[in-house]
Amino acid sequence: MRIQSLFIALALALTLAAPTSSALAVGVPKRAGAEKTAAEESARPIKNQKLSDFARQRPRDERGRFLPLGAKAAAPTTRANGSSGERATSTLSSNKTSSLRGGQSGGLRNWLTRNFTVRTQVSNLDSSTREKMRQGELHAAADGLTKSRVTAQGFRERLMLGSLQQDLTDTSLGQIRARSAAGDTLGTEDARQSLTQLKASGRLDWWTHWRAARAENRAFKNVISAANQAGRQGNLARAQDNLVYASDLRGPSNVKVARATGRFFRHSMSAADQFAWNGDPESTSQALGAAQNAAAAGGGTFNEARAKKLMHRAFERAVPNLLYQARLYKNSSPIEAALFLEQAMEIQKAEGVRLGFLDRRRQSALLAQLGPRIRANQAARAQGGAQTQAKANSTEDKTATE
């Protein structure tokens, strides 16, 4: 009986204590979970709420830009923080600063300048330089390119200027070799000045510098070869021109220049001998003058006696040629025939040339036919000389009177 009553009392006690312990055990975690859920829900948009409504409720700054989540909106500006004029001034200054920054980083102003100013200048420079290159004025083209103040701003302008400079450099390198090989000293100097201008501007890299130096060395060798070839062919004017240019490039003390000068002296004397046998006194005199200049430059020893002998031979053989020309034109052009005969007679008188039997008979026949024409020509020249002298005297008198 006692045991049964004890079991009943224990059951009643457990029944009364069970709700309280369960509430203590389960209530605390439920409250913490509830608070965490509420914070999460406040930090993110409601699941069923629209995104536009949430963006409308999100705080913004003064310029209308969204603030980070959890940040508070700035307090509205009052008159204590600054007047409306100050706010307007600050807004204008900020807009001006932003516009300037935009221009520096490729904005509208920079785009207009590049497309309507710089690009036009680059195009004009390209066309003018290429036109000078086509005309063969390489030095003028290089001078215009290096002294231009056009500054490229975009990739297209840089590409145009780089291509133009490369084409001018390649053309100068090619022309300095081709023109020097042809004996054209003016063209060679023009191309060399173009390369010098490009090198002085600092626009060439080390590889192009090496190519330019190599081309100049090749041009010097070509000039020496052209001088030797022209001397062998009897073109003394071109040979002397190339020799003088080679001397200007490396100096007269250069070994190759000295050898070329000696060869030019020998070629000049040979040409003078040939011209004398052909009866060309003028060409003989020019060849002897070139030989004398070469001898003065150290190319050899000039023989005055030999030179006089060659000149006498040239005049002696020129008289039969003049008589032949007079016989050839005596019927078709008597005036020219009379001039040839008169010139032959003057050479005989001045140089003491004696004619052979056949040449004397031909001269006598021509003189009988062209004698009146010769006397008329002499009278006309004398009258013209007198008139010219009278005009000169009257001019001098007027000048002295004034």
Image: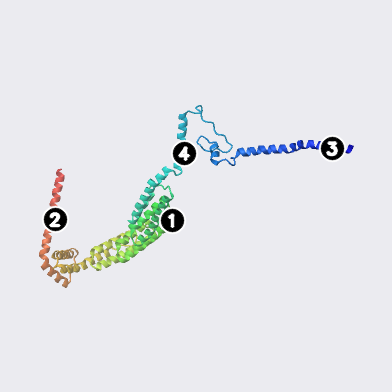
Question: Disc 1 or 3, which lies upstream in sequence?
Answer: 3
Q: Which residue is outermost to the top?
A: 80
Q: Mark 3 or mark 2, which has the lower sequence index?
A: 3
Residue identified by numbered label 2: 385
Q: Tag 1: Cα neighbours inside 10 Å, few (<14), some, or many (≥20)?
A: some
**Mark sitting on residue 8:** 3
Whole-percent x, y for residue 196 in the image: 39, 53
Mark 3 in CB contact with mark 2 (< 8 angstroms): no
Which quadrant holds residue 72? Answer: top right
Taking 262 as reference, is 34 left or right?
right
Horizontal side, residue 292 vs residue 166: left or right: left
Q: Nearer the viewer, mark 3 or mark 4?
A: 3
Residue matched to label 1: 208
**CA separation, marks 1 and 2?**
64 Å
Spatial CA span between label 4 and label 2: 89 Å
Q: Nearer the viewer, mark 1 or mark 4?
A: 4
Q: Earlier in the sequence, mark 1 or mark 2?
A: 1
Q: Earlier in the sequence, mark 1 or mark 4?
A: 4
Query: Mark 3 is on which residue type?
Result: Ile
In this view, the mark in front (1 or 3): 3
Query: In the image, residue 339 lies at what x, y percent?
Result: 15, 63
| SS of the residue under disc 3 | helix
In front: 121, or 237?
A: 121
The 10 Å Cα crowd at callout 3, few under 14, some 14 to 19, many 20 or more, is few
What's the amino acid at mark 1?
Thr
The residue identified by callout 4 is: 98
